[in-house]
Amino acid sequence: MKKIHLLTLLSIFLFANLSFARNKQDYINWAHTIAKSEMTRNAHLWQADFQKKPKWDYTQGLVAQAILATYQLTSDTSLLRYVDEFADFFVNEDGTIKTYVLDSYSLDRVNGGKFLFDYYELTKKDKYLKAVKLLRSQLNTHPRMSNGVFWHKKVYPEQVWLDGLYMADPFYARCINQLKEDKKLYDDVALQFILTDSLTLDTVTGLNYHAYNDDRKQPWADKTTGHSPNFWGRAIGWYMMAMVDVLDYMPKRHPARKQIIKNFNRLTDALLAVRDPATKMWYQVPNLPDSTGNYTESSCTAMFIYAIAKGARMKYYNNNEWYAHQARTSFEGLISNATIKNPDGTITISKACGVAGLGGTPYRSGTFDYYITEPIRNDDPKVVGPFILAALELAK
């Protein structure tokens, strides 16, 4: 028995320390390889998300942000040219944006422009700053629930989705910071996070439901709580990334800052409690790992790695090195279980949910069966972008 015990301890020790085997350059190389693989698959950045014609959307903006960040660490000018072609094509000289319609009021479209802050700093072209201001103006009139929380989209009335926090609020906070807006607006940013957390929180698991419907008119909404029926990995992933990113711009003394960090800690621990012990990845429906059809999903895993790694670097935890270790360990699991080397040298990231939402036409019910039967895709931009960002974060 003693020998078995010692062998078990040794195997645990060896597995635990796999995540420490990489140095800074290893992580940068992973980010660079995925970025170059994406460029090989899609000659133009607007083709990300399997688009057949140009469309200004959050996925392309996410990939642009990730590739631009990779350029800043590698100085590979081919990455910069790739982003430049995209930005120059979409943003007109007066700052208007092709295919963007402000009064469609979709928070997703705001995230498309997050990379423009850094791109403006690189190019100093006024049109990119004007485009930032145009997207910022949407939030002045964007529909809200009576409590002040943004609707996810005009077509989804009285609904807040976790996804929307990432789509709008780090951008919103950065605008307040860098455009020197009224600091009282940080209260509005804080409200989005504090109220959305309270409206979507499950106090038993510590996880957050995908969405909340204020008027309970949606068939998917619980008539008592307003919650959607299930937790969804990627929705929680967007939320986790939103918290660590918005804190970059929230004033150190803002009264809501401690609560956002507290919520971040709670959610991190809740997620680690349901992480798959074998692969170190997370499931499409995180709290039901043993349910038939559920699977370890790559996009939420990449998002959690990024958020936890950044949270540890920014010292948002009590034991930051332990959490950094968890992020590194899950990165190894993601590589081992969801990456494929192709004959041409590119790397494919597999096991990504194509899309999931609620309501709409055809109607999306938010049931467990709904989430697990949505298409699973390779090289979905919603894993490509977070994978790159996670690798770069681990290199810091």
Image (cartoon, helix red, strand yellow):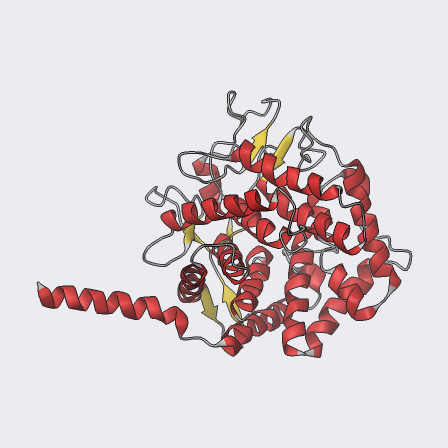
- Farthest residue in the front direction? 253
Quarter assignment of residue 369:
top left
Closer to the camera in the image, 395 or 330: 395
* Quarter of the image that includes the C terminus: bottom right
Quarter assignment of residue 277:
bottom left
Can residue 364 be seen here? The reply is no
Residue 322 left/right relative to 97:
left
Q: Is residue 26 above or below residue 383?
A: below
Residue 16 in percent (x, y) is at 33, 66
Q: Is residue 33 above or below residue 106?
A: below
Residue sitting at 55 percent across and 65 percent down?
393
Can residue 36 be seen here? The reply is yes
Number of callouts: 0
Residue sitting at 40 percent across and 64 percent down?
329
- Farthest residue in the left direction? 1
Closer to the camera in the image, 108 or 239: 239
Closer to the camera in the image, 265 or 97: 265
Residue 112 left/right relative to 92:
left
Residue 392 in percent (x, y) is at 56, 68
Closer to the camera in the image, 194 or 376: 194
